C-alpha cells in the first residue's frame, strides 16, 4: 500500500506526523494549546474541568498516534484476531489509566502543578464510563486492558449507550435513580461517520427459485436503522499497543428519515421515526443476573450483533481469502448469551448473502464462536419468546429452527432410544408461548463453552448443561477462572502499595507478571517493611474516612476495623445476612456493661451497591441498611464501637478508593450461586482479608493463599439442595439468634417495622431460599474470630502480606492467555521492533 504513494508525499507526511510529548514542558504546551484553542478558554477562566479536558486531550493525542500504528501493524501482520462481544463494558475513568500506561503520570503531575492544579483534583473531574452493571461488565473492561497489555490483536464490540447505569441517591433511606447522561464531553471516543452498517428489523421472508434454479431467500420490507461506529482507544501498559473498542450508536437511516413526510408537514411523525431509531442505543438495561424479555432489549442485541458481524465480515473480505479460512482469521467470544444472535447472523450472512451451502457455513460458524457462561441462576438464563422473534427477526427464527432440527437429528441418531433427551436439549422450549433457549443455541453454535471459576464450571456441567455434556462429551466444556487487571486494581488504585512492592522486589515487572509477587514472601518478617505495609493500609482508611466525611457528613474512626461489602444488591449475594449480623452485634453491645464494651474491637460496616430499579426486595435491603445506620450511628451507648455506612452510587472510580481501605471484605453468597466474583480478588490484592463462603473464586483464592489466611464459613454447595428441601418438608426452625434480630426489627427499633416484613417472612415463612438462617450461626462466630485475629496486628499484617504474595494467579493476564491458548488459538503480536524504534527517538 505504502509504495503506491509518491515518495515526496510520504516524506511530507513523515516530516509532519506528530511524535507525541514526553517532557513536562511539551505536556504543558500541548495541554495549554488545547485549553486555549480546542476549548477556547484562557488562563483566567480555566477551572478544574477545563484543566481536565486539556490534559485529557493532550493524552488522547498521544494515544491516537500509537493507536493508528497498532491498527496498521495489526492489519499488516494479517494474523487471526479476537473479537470480544459484550453488551457491557464497565470502563470507569480513562485519564489516570492512560497516564500510567504511557508512563507519563509524573510528567503530567509536575506540569499540572506548574499550571496551578493538583493532579488528583483533575483526575476526579472525569465522568466514569459506566456502560455496565457489575462484575460481567467490569470483567470485559479488565480483559480489554490485558489484551492490549499482552499485545493481542483484539477488538471489543459493544453499544454506545447514551445513558449508562443510573446514578444512585439515597433519600429517606430509599434508593432513588438519576439518569446518567455521560456524553456531554467525552474526549475518549471518535465518531466514525464513514463506518456504518444498516440493520434491518421486521419485514418478511421471500423464498423463490431463480433463473438458474437456485433457491434464493430474501428478507424484505423491513425497517432500517443505521449503526454508526464510535471508537475508543484501549492502551496497554508499558507497550505501544493500543487496541480498539468499537461501540455502535443507532440513528434513523438516511433513507428512512422521511423527507417527504417532513416536507408535507408531518413533522412530528418524521421526528418520531427518528427518535424510535435512536432509542435502540439510548439506555443500558440496569439488571444484573436477571433477564426480563423486553422487545427493546432484543432489538439492542440484534442491532449490535448485526453491526459487529457485518463489520467483521467486511474486514475479512478485504483479505480476499477463501471462506474456509474464516476461522483462521477470526475468533469471536460471546460474553454470556446476550450476543447469541451473532451465531445466527453469521449463518445468515454466509448462506443467504454469500451463497454458501448450509453445512459449509455451519462448520465455519461453529469453529468461530466461543461462549462464556456467567451464572447458573435460572432467572438470569435468557429465553426469548418465539412470537417476538418471529415478528422482529423472521429469517433468524427460520434459521434457529433449522439449526435445532439438524442438531436434534444428530442427537437422535446417537441416542435413538432417548425421546426425553430430545425435548430436554431442544433449543425450543415447548411452553405457551414457545421460547428460544439462548444458552442452548450458544452451546450448539460454539466450539467451546466455559465457566468462570472451577466450582462454577463444574456446576454447569452437572446441572444446567448436563445433557449437553452427554451429547458432546466433556471436552467441549472448560474452565477459565476470572482475573482482574493489576494495573488499575493495584497500581492505579493503591500507588503507595504498588511502590512499596516494587521497592522490595526490585522493579514494577510484577504489574506485567503478577506471579512475581511471590518474591514478597521472604519479607513477611521484615519489621520495617511490615510497618510501612500497615501504614499504607491506615492511610488508605483515612482517605476513605475522609470520603465518608464529605459525602455522608459524619466521621468514622480510621483505627476501627473496616468491614466492607460493595457489589450489586442481590438476595443471592446476601447483604441481608451482613446487616442481620450487624444488628446482632448492635444488640450484643447494648446488653454489655461498660467494662465489657472496652474489650471490643471497634468496627465500621460499610455497604455500597445499586439495586435494579424493579428489584423490590433488593431495595428493601438498602432501606434496612440505611435505617439501621441512622439508629446505630447516633446511639451514645455505641459510640465508635459500631458505625454503619451506606455509600451512595458505588461505581468503578469509587471502588478505587474503597477497595484499598478494607480490613475485611464480605463475599458471602449462598454456596453455588456466585459464578466467580472478582471483587474478592481486588480486595485481597490490596492487602485485605476476606470473610466468605465456599463459593465461586473464593475456593481458588483459599487454595492459593492458604486456609489460615481467609475466614470461611457456611454450608457447602453440595448441601444446598437438601437444605432447601428440608425447609419445605422437614421440621424446620429459624436460628434462634436470628429470631432475636427479627424481633428487634419487628419492635420498630429501626422505624416502620412493616417496611421490612417481606425480608423476614421470606426467611421465616417462605423457605429461606438463600439459606440465611442456616448460615447465620457460622457467620456470626466467624465474625467473632475476625475480631480476635484483628487484635493481634502483627499476625494480621503477616497474613495480609502472605496473601498478596500468593495472588499472582488472579491477574486477567493469565486469564486472557488461557483463552488465547485454549479457545481462540491466537498469538500476541511482536512489538519488539516498535519498542526499539520508540526507545531510539
Ligand atoms: N455476572 Br449472568 C454479572 O455481573 N451480571 C450478570 O448478568 C451475570 C453474571 C457476574 C457474576 O455474577 C459474577 O460471579 C462473575 O464474577 C462475573 O459475572 C464475571 O464473570
Image (spheres, helix red, strand yellow):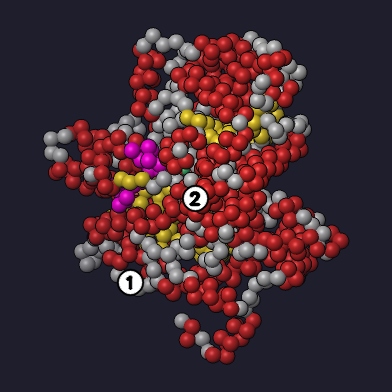
Give the residues drawn in magenta, as a range: 442-458
The residue beneath circle 2 is 518
Report whether residue 376 is seen.
yes
- Asked if residue 379 lies in the magenta stretch, the reply is no
Secondary structure found at label 2: helix
Q: Which mark is residue 128?
A: none
Closer to the camera, 326 or 108?
108
Residue 672, image x and y in percent? 40, 31
* Residue drawn at point x = 57 percent, y = 69 percent: 66
753 displayed left or right of 297:
right
Task: Look at the numbered disc 1 and give the secondary structure of its residue.
Answer: loop
Say which residue appears at 39% left-offset and 68% top-offset: 79
Q: Position of residue 297 (x, y in %)?
A: 48, 43
Between 584 and 550, the residue placed more toward the observer is: 584
Q: Nearer the viewer, residue 315 or 567?
A: 567
Residue under the image location 44 percent in, 68 percent down: 829
Q: CA distance from mark 2 to mark 1?
A: 47 Å
Amino acid at each position: 500500500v505504502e509504495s503506491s504513494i509518491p515518495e515526496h508525499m510520504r516524506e511530507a507526511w513523515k516530516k509532519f506526523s506528530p511524535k507525541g510529548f514526553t517532557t513536562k514542558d511539551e505536556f504543558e504546551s500541548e495541554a495549554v494549546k488545547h485549553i486555549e484553542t480546542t476549548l477556547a478558554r484562557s488562563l483566567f477562566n480555566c477551572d478544574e474541568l477545563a484543566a481536565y479536558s486539556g490534559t485529557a486531550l493532550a493524552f488522547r493525542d498521544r494515544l491516537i498516534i500509537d493507536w493508528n500504528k497498532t491498527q496498521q501493524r495489526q492489519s499488516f501482520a494479517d494474523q487471526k484476531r479476537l473479537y470480544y462481544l459484550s453488551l457491557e463494558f464497565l470502563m470507569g475513568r480513562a485519564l489516570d489509566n492512560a497516564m500510567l500506561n504511557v508512563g507519563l503520570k509524573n510528567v503530567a503531575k509536575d506540569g499540572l502543578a506548574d499550571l496551578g492544579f493538583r493532579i488528583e483534583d483533575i483526575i476526579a473531574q472525569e465522568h466514569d464510563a459506566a456502560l455496565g452493571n457489575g462484575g460481567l461488565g467490569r470483567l470485559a473492561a479488565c480483559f480489554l486492558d490485558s489484551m492490549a497489555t499482552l499485545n493481542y490483536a483484539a477488538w471489543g464490540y459493544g453499544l454506545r449507550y447514551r445513558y449508562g447505569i443510573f446514578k444512585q441517591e439515597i433519600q429517606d433511606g430509599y434508593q432513588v435513580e438519576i439518569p446518567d447522561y455521560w456524553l456531554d464531553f467525552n474526549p475518549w471516543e471518535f465518531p466514525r461517520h464513514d463506518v456504518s452498517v444498516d440493520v434491518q428489523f421486521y419485514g418478511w421472508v421471500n423464498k423463490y427459485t431463480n433463473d438458474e434454479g437456485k433457491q434464493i431467500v430474501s428478507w424484505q420490507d423491513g425497517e432500517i436503522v443505521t449503526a454508526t461506529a464510535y471508537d475508543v482507544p484501549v492502551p496497554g501498559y508499558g507497550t505501544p499497543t493500543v487496541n480498539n473498542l468499537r461501540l455502535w450508536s443507532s440513528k434513523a437511516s438516511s433513507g428512512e428519515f422521511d423527507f417527504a413526510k417532513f416536507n408535507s408537514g408531518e413533522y412530528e411523525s418524521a421526528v418520531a421515526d427518528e427518535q424510535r431509531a435512536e432509542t435502540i442505543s439510548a439506555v443500558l438495561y440496569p439488571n444484573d443476573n436477571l433477564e426480563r424479555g423486553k422487545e427493546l432489549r432484543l432489538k439492542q442485541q440484534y442491532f449490535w450483533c448485526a453491526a459487529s458481524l457485518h463489520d467483521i465480515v467486511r474486514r475479512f473480505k478485504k483479505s480476499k481469502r477463501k471462506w474456509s479460512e474464516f476461522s483462521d482469521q477470526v475468533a469471536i467470544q460471546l460474553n454470556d448469551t446476550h450476543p447469541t444472535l451473532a451465531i445466527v447472523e453469521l449463518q445468515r450472512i454466509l448462506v443467504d448473502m454469500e451463497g454458501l451451502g448450509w453445512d459449509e457455513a455451519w462448520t465455519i460458524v461453529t469453529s468461530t464462536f466461543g461462549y462464556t457462561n456467567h451464572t447458573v441462576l435460572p432467572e438470569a438464563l435468557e429465553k426469548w419468546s418465539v412470537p417476538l422473534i418471529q415478528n422482529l427477526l423472521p429469517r433468524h427464527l427460520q434459521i434457529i429452527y433449522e439449526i435445532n432440527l439438524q442438531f436434534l437429528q444428530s442427537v437422535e441418531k446417537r441416542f435413538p432410544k432417548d425421546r426425553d433427551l430430545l425435548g430436554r436439549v431442544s433449543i425450543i422450549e415447548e411452553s405457551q408461548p414457545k421460547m428460544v433457549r439462548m444458552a442452548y443455541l450458544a452451546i450448539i453454535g460454539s466450539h467451546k463453552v466455559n465457566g468462570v471459576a472451577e466450582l462454577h464450571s463444574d456446576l454447569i456441567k452437572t446441572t444446567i448443561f448436563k445433557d449437553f455434556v452427554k451429547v458432546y462429551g466433556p471436552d467441549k466444556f472448560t474452565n477459565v477462572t476470572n482475573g482482574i487487571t493489576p494495573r488499575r486494581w493495584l497500581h492505579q488504585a493503591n500507588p503507595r502499595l504498588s511502590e512499596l512492592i516494587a521497592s522490595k522486589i526490585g522493579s514494577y515487572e510484577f504489574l506485567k507478571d503478577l506471579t512475581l509477587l511471590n518474591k514478597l514472601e521472604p519479607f513477611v518478617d521484615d519489621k520495617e517493611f511490615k510497618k510501612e505495609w500497615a501504614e499504607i493500609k491506615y492511610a488508605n482508611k483515612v482517605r476513605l474516612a475522609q470520603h465518608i466525611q464529605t459525602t455522608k457528613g459524619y466521621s468514622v474512626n480510621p483505627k476501627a476495623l473496616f468491614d466492607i461489602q460493595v457489589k450489586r444488591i442481590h438476595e443471592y449475594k446476601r447483604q441481608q445476612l451482613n446487616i442481620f449480623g450487624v444488628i446482632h452485634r448492635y444488640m450484643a453491645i447494648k446488653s454489655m456493661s461498660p467494662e465489657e464494651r472496652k474489650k471490643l474491637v471497634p468496627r465500621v460496616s460499610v455497604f455500597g451497591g445499586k439495586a435494579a430499579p424493579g428489584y423490590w426486595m433488593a431495595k428493601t435491603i438498602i432501606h434496612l441498611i440505611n435505617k439501621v445506620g441512622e439508629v446505630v450511628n447516633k446511639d451514645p451507648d455505641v459510640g465508635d464501637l459500631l458505625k454503619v455506612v451506606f455509600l451512595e452510587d458505588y461505581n468503578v472510580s469509587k471502588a478505587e478508593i474503597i477497595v484499598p481501605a478494607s480490613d475485611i471484605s464480605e463475599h458471602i453468597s449462598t454456596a453455588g450461586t456466585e459464578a466467580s466474583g472478582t471483587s474478592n480478588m481486588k480486595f485481597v490484592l490490596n492487602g485485605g482479608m476476606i470473610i466468605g463462603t465456599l463459593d465461586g473464586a473464593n475456593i481458588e483464592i483459599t487454595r492459593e493463599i492458604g486456609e489460615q489466611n481467609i475466614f470461611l464459613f457456611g454450608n457447602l454447595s453440595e448441601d444446598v439442595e437438601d437444605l432447601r428441601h428440608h425447609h419445605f418438608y422437614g421440621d424446620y426452625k429459624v436460628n434462634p439468634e436470628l429470631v432475636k434480630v427479627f424481633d428487634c426489627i419487628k419492635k420498630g427499633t429501626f422505624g416502620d417495622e412493616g417496611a421490612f416484613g417481606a425480608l423476614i417472612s421470606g426467611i421465616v415463612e417462605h423457605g429461606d431460599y438463600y439459606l440465611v438462617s442456616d448460615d447465620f450461626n457460622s457467620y456470626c462466630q466467624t465474625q467473632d474470630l475476625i475480631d480476635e485475629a484483628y487484635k493481634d496486628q502483627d499476625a494480621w499484617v503477616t497474613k495480609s502480606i502472605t496473601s498478596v504474595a500468593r495472588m499472582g494467579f488472579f491477574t486477567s493476564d493469565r486469564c486472557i492467555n488461557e483463552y488465547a491458548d485454549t479457545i481462540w488459538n491466537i498469538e500476541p503480536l511482536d512489538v519488539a521492533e516498535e519498542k526499539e524504534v520508540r526507545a531510539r527517538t
